[in-house]
Amino acid sequence: MLYIFITMESYAQYQKVNSNDLDIYYRIFGEGTSILIIGGGPGDNSNRYLSLCELLSNDFQSILVDQRGTGKSSPSVYDSSTISVSLTLEDFEIIRKTLGLKEWAVLGFSYGGYLASLYTHFYPSSVSKLILLESMGLNIEVFNYFADNITSKLSADDLKLVEFWNDSSRIADNFHHAITEQIRAKMPGYFYDREKSFIVSSAITDSDFNFNMGRWIWNDVINNDLDISKMENNFNAPVLILHGRQDPVGESVPQYLNQYYKNSELHFIERSGHYSWIEQPDQIHSLIKNFLERNK
């Protein structure tokens, strides 16, 4: 599982649907119970989650979407008319209907966990079960300390590399590349096992991130006060919360999620940071499999 970041791309054909005048692309891996995979960011290329799909595809049908504004699902113009949370949620719905699914399981990672929670709130009847994997929670409060938690785990050499790419001249010369290299330099701070962080950092490319899309999404979240904790919880289906014990998101976020979702179960993954499916793949696979196959 740990080695598949690109190879799965060779045997999964892109499919597309038109949603609000934009072609939205997605790929399907495996067969069985359908799981919508919502990656993080916002702005991540879906290729970053091929390894997660590979982990699940022997038992389930994983549907991996190039979210609106990323990868092949990129509009010619980025503004509030083409990039928003509501449009993204509508994209998911159109894919579900196109595939002829009455409902599907939904797995959201990091920012994708927040987006998955929004999806279940606005389209509760479309979701059979919800899996929150290292979710950022129900709002953006985690960012009050998330970056500090990452930085606190970096070595002196890591910090020097971050400082190198944070230099104003390098940012001015190539903003996108400079920020991408900062993400690469900070990757050990996301992990319990430093060596495993290099599995992710060595595969990172500039095309993995669309920071322009991310800016429009955050503007939308803030301007429309998309704080799920202020919304009535109307989702009663089972929820599985998986969270690395050493995740820089901290333990308060999954504990609050566990309180918010009355039909939920929380499992901390020991010796694991933010990318638990890479650090502890067997445990993540087992917990998800047991959860999805329970009471079919």
Image (spheres, rainbow, N blue to C red):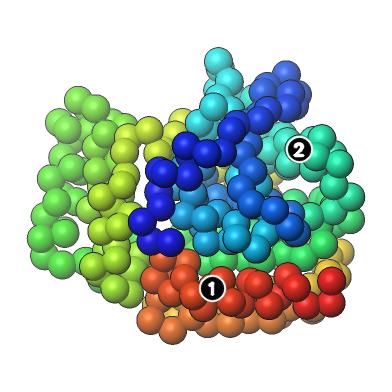
Examine the image and state in which quarter residue 27 appears: top right
Q: Could one spot residue 190 in this view of the protein?
A: yes
Disc marking residue 79? none
Q: Which amino acid does label 2 sit on?
A: Ile
Q: Could one spot residue 44 in this view of the protein?
A: no
Q: Do the residues labelled 1 and 2 touch (CB within 8 Å)?
A: no
Placement of the C terminus among the 4 image quadrants: bottom right
Disc marking residue 95? 2
Disc marking residue 284? 1
Image: 69 above or below 223: above
Say which residue appears at 65% left-offset and 63% top-offset.
59
Viewer-closest of 220 and 128: 128
Dot 1, crowdedness within 10 Å: few (<14), some or many (≥20)?
A: many
Say which residue appears at 73% left-offset and 19% top-offset.
21
Q: Which amino acid does label 1 sit on?
A: Ile
Whole-angstrom CA distance, mark 1 to mark 2, is 26 Å
Instruction: Judge left or right: residue 271 versus residue 117.
Output: left
Residue at the top extreme, as displayed:
76
Label 2: element kind: helix
